[in-house]
Image: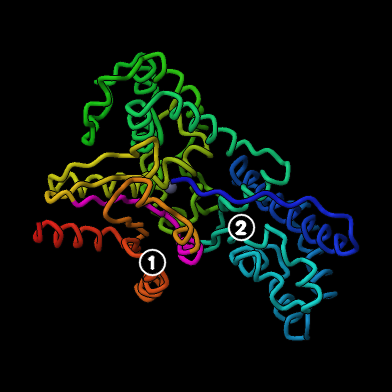
Amino acid sequence: MHDGAQGEPASNGCESTQLRNQFLETVFLIAAGLRKREELFAANPRRYPYCNELRLGIQRFAALHAQHAEDNQALRNLLDGLSESGFIRTWCTRDLSTWIEQWTPAAREELGNLECLELGPFAEVGGSFFNITGDCLEFLRLNGNGNTDDFHENRVYSMLRDAGQAAYVFGRKFLILHPTLSWEERTAAAHANLAVLEVDQLDQGEVAHIDGAWVQELVDTAYERAPLGLKVCPVCGWTMSLHGLRPMCLDARCTVRVDADEYENLPDVPPNSYRLRRGVMRFIAKPGILELQIAHKVQAFGLPFELWPLLDTCDILITLPGGHTIAVDAKDHHDIDRLVRSIESDDMREAMAASEAIYVVPADTPPPRRRAANRRLAHKPGYSIKTLRELTQHLKTEMGDA
Ligand SMILES: [Zn+2]
């Protein structure tokens, strides 16, 4: 399912709007700077992504922090992270509310109900790389700066939704299974000659309902020509390029897994290939890898399942032999506190009329954090957080009981 954040309230003209406006402007400069820096990396990985907005945003934040921080320790904490990369690592990887937690009560009260303070981190750092998050893009979008990644993601989502359930399932799976297309594959897909493509093991008959012209339009909308000289990312299947000596994908979690020597040995992206546009890869295909892993596990048990039922009310609905049903959502990120908050106001189990709702998190989410999160969900019976391995174990147990 898709997460969303709220818009900023309009300023109300009282005295305290000054600090609010200064803070919002500063956050905007930082968010826009992070995005520009990431775009500069992508456009020319060999050049240092010098970025005025980020520099300026950091300076303004330092000035506000110096003015409103409660004590010297807070200032020292800031000074430790004033270089661009230090700032990204120290500040941008934390919830926005923590940026002001060392400010005076008066200053915090003035900012109190700014909705951007609900946002999670703006960047994820892996090794010496960073990638901006959906929250960063959401903040920019809500603050009037349209973003091409969001634009492409939204266009593809509305194409999928408008086409109905069978096409939705076919199309979303197609994008997850094909982060890149060779020229031959793209030509075949554009002629709805799907037999040329790798067999989709999860097909449950939806391919029979697909209109060729629609597939062609989907491919045109979702893909772009891949630049020359790229390698195939061994983690997500998208493209990797070198920044100086460092290989980069659009997700920091891919980037940390490949070093310069390994990069040399990766397969080349063939000339004339196409790849998913960044926003489609980032928001649809990359999180979808975990969704399909879950579906493959369920299929291996021989259990009936539906992918993205009711146009994505959950990711997978599993039916056990005794009629027990489980609505599953895959959450391919590590912000487990935010996940708990979103589950608290979620009604996935009720919306799917399912016996249970399970949110699957990445395998490397630390067990103590998962246990703590499940304790916090104790007041919401039928809702839990599990890894794929725990879900698998749970299915085995439930099948044994049935
Ligand atoms: Zn990757």
The question of residue 327 being in magenta is answered with yes
- What residue is shown with label 1? 365
The question of residue 206 being in magenta is answered with no
> Which residue is at 36% across, 47% downward?
234
Q: In which quarter of the image is residue 305?
A: top left
Q: Nearer the viewer, residue 268 or 336?
A: 336
> Can see residue 160?
yes
Q: What stretch is highlighted in magenta?
A: 324-340
In percent of width and height, residue 139 lies at 66, 50
> Which residue is at 35% across, 20% downward?
189
- Name the residue type under label 1: Thr
In percent of width and height, residue 344 lies at 46, 62
- Name the residue type under label 2: Phe
Crowd class of label 2 (few under 14; some 14 to 19; many from 20; radius 10 Å) = many
Q: In the structure shown, which secondary structural element does the residue marked by tag 2 occupy?
A: loop
146 relative position to 349: left or right? right
In percent of width and height, residue 129 lies at 55, 58
Residue 122 shows which numbered tag?
2
Q: In the structure shown, which secondary structural element does the residue marked by tag 1 occupy?
A: loop
Q: Quadrant of residue 21?
A: bottom right
How many marks overall? 2
> Gap between marks 2 and 1, in whole Å?
19 Å
249 relative position to 372: left or right? right
Q: Nearer the viewer, residue 314 or 272?
A: 314
Dot placed on the residue nearer the N-terminal end, 2 or 1: 2
The answer to whether marks 2 and 1 mark residues whose Cβ atoms lie closer than 8 Å is: no
291 relative position to 66: left or right? left
Label 1 CB sits under 8 Å from any ligand 1 atom: no
In percent of width and height, residue 169 lies at 34, 32
